[in-house]
Amino acid sequence: MYICSCNGLTDYDVQAAVEAGATRPREVYAARKCRAQCGNCVKGVSCLLREALKARQSQSVMLAAADVSHHEATRAVA
């Protein structure tokens, strides 16, 4: 879905920017080599950015917990 019609910025662009390390709206725009022009999209970009960062953090926590469980299971077998 388009978030910014001025720059053609989509929700996929926001996700890709987060995967590339973006943590702020300006970094999302910079990843697409654009900037907020009229400003109507900033709230939407910020919201999607927040959601993507939360999802990434949750995934990291789950992976860390799975890694700990794997190590504990490996020790129990040994």
Image (tube, grey):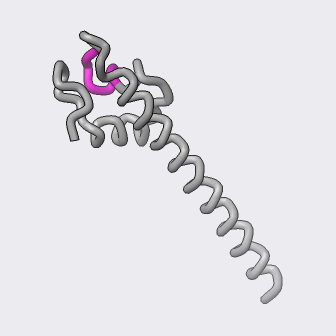
Rendered residue at 29%/14% (across/down): 35
* Tally of marks: 0
Residue furthest top in the image: 37
* Whole-percent x, y for residue 29 in the image: 32, 22
Question: In front: 20, or 3?
Answer: 3
From the viewer's perspective, is 69 left or right of 8?
A: right
From the viewer's perspective, is 54 left or right of 12?
A: right
From the viewer's perspective, is 54 left or right of 22?
A: right
Rendered residue at 22%/41% (across/down): 1
Q: Which residues are magenta?
A: 29-35
Relative to 61, say whether 22 is above or below: above
When asked about the image quadrant of residue 77, the answer is bottom right
Relative to 55, say whether 37 is above or below: above
Question: In front: 37, or 32?
Answer: 37
- Is residue 6 found inside the magenta-colored segment of the image? no
Rendered residue at 39%/24% (across/down): 43
Is residue 78 visible to the viewer in this orientation of the structure?
no
Rendered residue at 51%/49% (across/down): 55
Relative to 5, say whether 17 is above or below: below
